[in-house]
Image: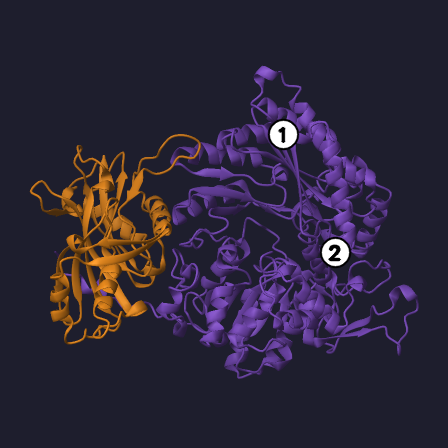
C-alpha cells in the first residue's frame, strides 16, 4: 500500500538540503517504527520518493514524501509516532493512504503555492501593488534562467498562475514539476528588475515559504497532493 | 491559491544562530554550524553549573564520526549540573567570513561563544590537526598560549592518542587528560564546581587538577635541555632534554594514564547524535573491545591502549539494539583495533546478521583477518562482485614482517586470497609501509613479488571459472616512528629516501609477470615528514606550529590545504631542525620528551622489543603468552584473565 506523508520544514532546518532531508526521513522511518517496505538485493533501500525539492533557505508547510508500507498504523498514530522522532523545524502534518490506481507518484506535480516576504516583514514599497498589476499585464514576461548549460530566456507569464500582492507579502501560484519548474525567487527578481527605478531586489533578505503542492485534477483545475489520499482511520497495527 | 498560511510555521522564530542567515546561505554545507541534530542534548545553559564544549579540530563530518566524543558527550550530559556542547573546525570558507565579520566561534548547539564555556576539551587524534587547534582557540578569542589566559577564559584540556606526546602542544593547553575519559572527568567537574563556588583562581583550580591521577598541567613542569652551558655527557645527547620535573612537590613526577577496567560496566552512548549531513562514518559504532593483543612494533595504539579489554556479548547485544532504534541508522559497524581477536566474534556477528539483516540493516566489519569465517560473513553482508578483500601485511618480506612483529605470513595471505577468489572475489587490497627499520631493497621489492604471487594464485583457477581479470591494489604509506613504541628511538627516512623507496617498488611492479592486474599507490612524503616532527617533538616545536598557523596553515590533513613551503619556512624562521627530530638516531639513554608519562608499558619492555626487532625475532601475542610488558599493573582485561 502506498502512503503520502505531508510535512513542514522550517526554522534552522531551512539550511538542510534536499538529499539530507531524504536521509533524515529514511532514518526517521526506522526510529518511528513505520512498517515501510524495502527493495531486495544486497543493499535494500526503503521504497520512498520525494516531491519537488525545496531550495536551500526556504521554509515549507507543503512538503511530501510517498512511501510504500506493508502494514500501517492509523493516520493519527503514524503522525504521532513520526513527530516523536522529528527535530525542531521538521513536523509531520498528515499521513494518508493513496488509492491503488494512483500512478506516477511525484511526477504528477503541476503547481505550487508560495508566500514571499522581506525579512522582518518589512512592507513592500507603496507602488508595489500597482507595479505588480502592471507587470502581470505585460504581453510577455521574459525571465533569464541560469542553468549548467548557460543562460536561457523564457516567457514566464503563462506560468504565473495566480497571485495576490499585499502590503507585506506576495502570494504566488506558479507552474512546478519536472516539465516546467518556475522558482518563486526568479519571478520576484524578474519583477524587481522590470522596474529598476522603483524597486530593488531584496537579495538574501527575500524570504520564501512554500504553502502547498498540487497536481492537475480531472476538471482542469488543481488538487492539493494531500487531498489525493485518504485518512487511515484504523490501521492493521495499533 | 492558498493564502491561509500557518504563520506559526512560516514566521517561526528561528533558533538563535550565531551566524546571520545570509552568511550561512553563502557557505558550503551550512548544516555544519546549526546543531539541533537528532539526539542532541539541547539543555538550557542557565540551568547548569558547568559548561563544557567538546571539540574535534577538523571538519564537522569527520568530527561527528568519532566515537570518543560521543562517549564523553553522553557521559557529561547525564549529569544535570553539566551541559556538554560541541564545536568543530569551521571550514576555510566559514573561517574567512567569521574573521571578516568578527563572529566569535560558538558551540553548535547552544550557539554560545566558546569563550563563555568553563572548559574547552579538544581531542587530538592525529598530528596534522595541530594548526586547527590554534584556529579553534584564535577564532574563539582565547589566547593561544595558556600563560596569557585570564579568569575569563575557559580551561583548555586535551586528550586522545596524540596527548601521549603532548609536548609540541604543551604551551597551548591548560591540562591534558592522559588516558580514557570515562574514569576521572566527573571528579574534575565536582572539583571545579566546588572551587569556582569558593571563588578560587584559575591557578588554584589547575593546581588541584594536577593532583588528580592522569592529569598533566604543562605549566607546572619545567624542562631543561643540554646546551653550551650544560654540555651533554655524550655527543649523542646534544640538545636533548637534561631534566624534566614538576615545580611543586605535591604533584606527581610521572603521570600514569587512566583506564577503564571493566568495559561492560561503563558508559556507552547508545543514543548517539545523528547529523543531518552525511558524516564520514554514516553508521552506528559498536566498540567491541579496547586495546590489542598483537603488539605490532610500529603501532602506537597497540601499545598505549593496553591491556586488551573485551566487552561482554550481553552488553554488546543490548547496546546494538538501542543504537539502531535510537538513531534509525541503516548500518552498524564493529569497532576495535583487531576485530578477529574478539573472543565471541562469531557469535556476535551471527546474532547481528540473524536479528537485523531482514530489517535492511547492514553490518560492516573493518579490521578482520581474512579466513574462512570472515569470508563467509562477508559474503552474507556484501556483494562479492562489488567488494574487495583487504590485507595489511605492512612489509614485503617475512623477515621484515618479523622485525615489525606483524604476525601475518605469506601463507596466510596467499591462502586467504585463494579462498576469496574461490568464493568469487576478484579484488584484493593490500596495505604496506615503506621506511621501516632495517628495510632493504629486497624488502621493498618483496611488495610487488608478494602481489604477483596473489595474482598468480588467481590464475590457478580454471579459466571458465574466473570472473574476468583479478585486480590487486597495493598502497604504501611512509613509516613514522611514534612515542611509546619499540621504534621510538629509530631514525626516520628523509623525504628523498621515502620517494626513492617508492620508486624502487614502482619499478619492480613494472617487471612483474602480472603487472597489468596490479596497481600501486603511495602517500605523500611531505606530510609524513611533518607528522614525524610533530609526533616526536618537544616543547621547542610549539613555536613552529604557531608560526605556520600565523602564515595561514590550517587543515594540514587535507592535501588541498597543506602548504609545505610555509611549514618549511616556519622551521627555518624558528631555527628548529627537522633532522634533529626525524633522522637523528636516539640513544636508549636519552630522556625522551614523553618519558614523564606512564602508559603501564615499561621502557625496559620497549628496549627489549627493539632489540628483538633488530634480530627479526617475533613476540607472541598477549593471549598466547604474556610478554611482561608491565601493563599487568593495571590489573585489567587480558592480564587478569590470564591469571585466572
Which residue: 74% across, 61% down?
B536
Which residue: 32% across, 43% down?
A33
Q: Please rate how many residues cluster around mark 2, counting C-alpha atoms within 10 Å: few if below 14, some from 14 to 19, many from 20.
A: many
Q: Position of residue A152 (x, y in %)?
A: 30, 53
- Residue to which mark 2 is pinned: B484
Q: Hue of chain A?
A: orange
Q: Position of residue B312 (x, y in %)?
A: 55, 43
Residue A145 vertical placement versus B470 (above, below):
below
Q: Secondary structure at mark 1?
A: loop
Q: Secondary structure at mark 2?
A: loop
How is the model colour-coded?
by chain
Task: Name the chain under label 1.
Answer: B
- Residue to which mark 1 is pinned: B371
Task: Name the chain under label 2.
Answer: B
A96 relative position to B607: left or right: left
Residue B487 vertical placement versus B208 (above, below):
above
> Quarter-wise, where is residue B206 in the image?
bottom right
| Residue B90 in sight in this render | no
Front in this rendered view, residue B117 or A115: A115
| Colour purple maps to chain | B
Q: Quadrant of the C terminus of chain B?
A: top right
Q: Position of residue A49 (x, y in %)?
A: 29, 42
| Residue B93 in sight in this render | yes
Amino acid at each position: 500500500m502506498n502512503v503520502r506523508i505531508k510535512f513542514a520544514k522550517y526554522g534552522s532546518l531551512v539550511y538542510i538540503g534536499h538529499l539530507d532531508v531524504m536521509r533524515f526521513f529514511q532514518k526517521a522511518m526506522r526510529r518511528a517504527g513505520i512498517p515501510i517496505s524495502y527493495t531486495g538485493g544486497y543493499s535494500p533501500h526503503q521504497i520512498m520518493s520525494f516531491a519537488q525539492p525545496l531550495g536551500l533557505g526556504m521554509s515549507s508547510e507543503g512538503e511530501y514524501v510517498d512511501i510504500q508500507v506493508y502494514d500501517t498504523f492509523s493516520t493519527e498514530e503514524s503522525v504521532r509516532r513520526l513527530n516523536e522522532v522529528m527535530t525542531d523545524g521538521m513536523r509531520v502534518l498528515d499521513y494518508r493512504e493513496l488509492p491503488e490506481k494512483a500512478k506516477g507518484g511525484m511526477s504528477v506535480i503541476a503547481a505550487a503555492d508560495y508566500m514571499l516576504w522581506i525579512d522582518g516583514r518589512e512592507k513592500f514599497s507603496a507602488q508595489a501593488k500597482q507595479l505588480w498589476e502592471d507587470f502581470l499585464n505585460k504581453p510577455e514576461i521574459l525571465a533569464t534562467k541560469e542553468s549548467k548549460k548557460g543562460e536561457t530566456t523564457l516567457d514566464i507569464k503563462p506560468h504565473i498562475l495566480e497571485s495576490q500582492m499585499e502590503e507585506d507579502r506576495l502570494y504566488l501560484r506558479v507552474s512546478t514539476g519536472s516539465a516546467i519548474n518556475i522558482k518563486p525567487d526568479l519571478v520576484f527578481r524578474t519583477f524587481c528588475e522590470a522596474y529598476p527605478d522603483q524597486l530593488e531586489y531584496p537579495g538574501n533578505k527575500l524570504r520564501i515559504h512554500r504553502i502547498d503542492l498540487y497536481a492537475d485534477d480531472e476538471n482542469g483545475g488543481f488538487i492539493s497532493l494531500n487531498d489525493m489520499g485518504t485518512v487511515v482511520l484504523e490501521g492493521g497495527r495499533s | 491559491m492558498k493564502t491561509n498560511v500557518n504563520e506559526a510555521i512560516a514566521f517561526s522564530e528561528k533558533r538563535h544562530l550565531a551566524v546571520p542567515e545570509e552568511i550561512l546561505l553563502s557557505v558550503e554545507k551550512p548544516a555544519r554550524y546549526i546543531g539541533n541534530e537528532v539526539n542532541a542534548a539541547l539543555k538550557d545553559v542557565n540551568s547548569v553549573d558547568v559548561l563544557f564544549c567538546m571539540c574535534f579540530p577538523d571538519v564537522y563530518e569527520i568530527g561527528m564520526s568519532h566515537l570518543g566524543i560521543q562517549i564523553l558527550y553522553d557521559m557529561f550530559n547525564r549529569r544535570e549540573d553539566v551541559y556538554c556542547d560541541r564545536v568543530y573546525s569551521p571550514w576555510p570558507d566559514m573561517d574567512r567570513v567569521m574573521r571578516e565579520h568578527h563572529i566569535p566561534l560558538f558551540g553548535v548547539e547552544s550557539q554560545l561563544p566558546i569563550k563563555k564555556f568553563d572548559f574547552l576539551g579538544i581531542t587530538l587524534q592525529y598530528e596534522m590537526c595541530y594548526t586547527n587547534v590554534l584556529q579553534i582557540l584564535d577564532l574563539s578569542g582565547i589566547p593561544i598560549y595558556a600563560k596569557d589566559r585570564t579568569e575569563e577564559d575557559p580551561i583548555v584540556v586535551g586528550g586522545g592518542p596524540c596527548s601521549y606526546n603532548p609536548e609540541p602542544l604543551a604551551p597551548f593547553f591548560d591540562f591534558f587528560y592522559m588516558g580514557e575519559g570515562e574514569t576521572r572527568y566527573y571528579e574534575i567537574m565536582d572539583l571545579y564546581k566546588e572551587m569556582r563556588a569558593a571563588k578560587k583562581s584559575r591557578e588554584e583550580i589547575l593546581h588541584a587538577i594536577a593532583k588528580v591521577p592522569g592529569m598533566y598541567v604543562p605549566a607546572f613542569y619545567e624542562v631543561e635541555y643540554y646546551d653550551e652551558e650544560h654540555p651533554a655527557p655524550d655527543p649523542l645527547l646534544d640538545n636533548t632534554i637534561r631534566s624534566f620535573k614538576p615545580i611543586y612537590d605535591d604533584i606527581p613526577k610521572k603521570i600514569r594514564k587512566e583506564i577503564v577496567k571493566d568495559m561492560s560496566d561503563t558508559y556507552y552512548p547508545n543514543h548517539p547524535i545523528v547529523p543531518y549531513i552525511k558524516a564520514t562514518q554514516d553508521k552506528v559504532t559498536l566498540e567491541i573491545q579496547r586495546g590489542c593483543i598483537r603488539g605490532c612494533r610500529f603501532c602506537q595504539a597497540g601499545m598505549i591502549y593496553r591491556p586488551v579489554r573485551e566487552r561482554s556479548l550481553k552488553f554488546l547485544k543490548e547496546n546494538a539494539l538501542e543504537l539502531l532504534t535510537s538513531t534509525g541508522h541503516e548500518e552498524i559497524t564493529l569497532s576495535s583495533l583487531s576485530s578477529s581477536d574478539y573472543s565471541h566474534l562469531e557469535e556476535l556477528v551471527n546474532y547481528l546478521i540473524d536479528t537485523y539483516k531482514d530489517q535492511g540493516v547492514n553490518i560492516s566489519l573493518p579490521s578482520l583477518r581474512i579466513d574462512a569465517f570472515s569470508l563467509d560473513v562477508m559474503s552474507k553482508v556484501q556483494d562479492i562482485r562489488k567488494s574487495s578483500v583487504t590485507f595489511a601485511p605492512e612489509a614485503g618480506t617475512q623477515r621484515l614482517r618479523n622485525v615489525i612483529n606483524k604476525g601475518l605470513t605469506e601463507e596466510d595471505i596467499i591462502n586467504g586470497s585463494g579462498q576469496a577468489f574461490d568464493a568469487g572475489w576478484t579484488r584484493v587490497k593490500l596495505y604496506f609501509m615503506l621506511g621501516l627499520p632495517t628495510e632493504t631493497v629486497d624488502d621493498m621489492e618483496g611488495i610487488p613479488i608478494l602481489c604477483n604471487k596473489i595474482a598468480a594464485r588467481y590464475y590457478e583457477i580454471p579459466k571458465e571459472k574466473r570472473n574476468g581479470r583479478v585486480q590487486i591494489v597495493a598502497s604504501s604509506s611512509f613509516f613514522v616512528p611514534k612515542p611509546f613504541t619499540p621504534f621510538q628511538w629509530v631514525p626516520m627516512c628523509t623525504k628523498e629516501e621515502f620517494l626513492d623507496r617508492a620508486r624502487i617498488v614502482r619499478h619492480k611492479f613494472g617487471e612483474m609477470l602480472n603487472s597489468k592486474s596490479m596497481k600501486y599507490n603511495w602517500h605523500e612524503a611531505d606530510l609524513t615528514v611533518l607528522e614525524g616532527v610533530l609526533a616526536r617533538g618537544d616543547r621547542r616545536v610549539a613555536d613552529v606550529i604557531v608560526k605556520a598557523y600565523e602564515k595561514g596553515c590550517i587543515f594540514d590533513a587535507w592535501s588541498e590545504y597543506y602548504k609545505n613551503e610555509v611549514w618549511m619556512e616556519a622551521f627555518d624562521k624558528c631555527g628548529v631542525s627537522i633532522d634533529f627530530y626525524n633522522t637523528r638516531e636516539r640513544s636508549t639513554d636519552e630522556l625522551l620528551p614523553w618519558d614523564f608519562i606512564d602508559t603501564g608499558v615499561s621502557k625496559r619492555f620497549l628496549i627489549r622489543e627493539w632489540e628483538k626487532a633488530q634480530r627479526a625475532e617475533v613476540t607472541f601475542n598477549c593471549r598466547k603468552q604474556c610478554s611482561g610488558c608491565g601493563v599487568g599493573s593495571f590489573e585489567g582485561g587480558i592480564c587478569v584473565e590470564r591469571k585466572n
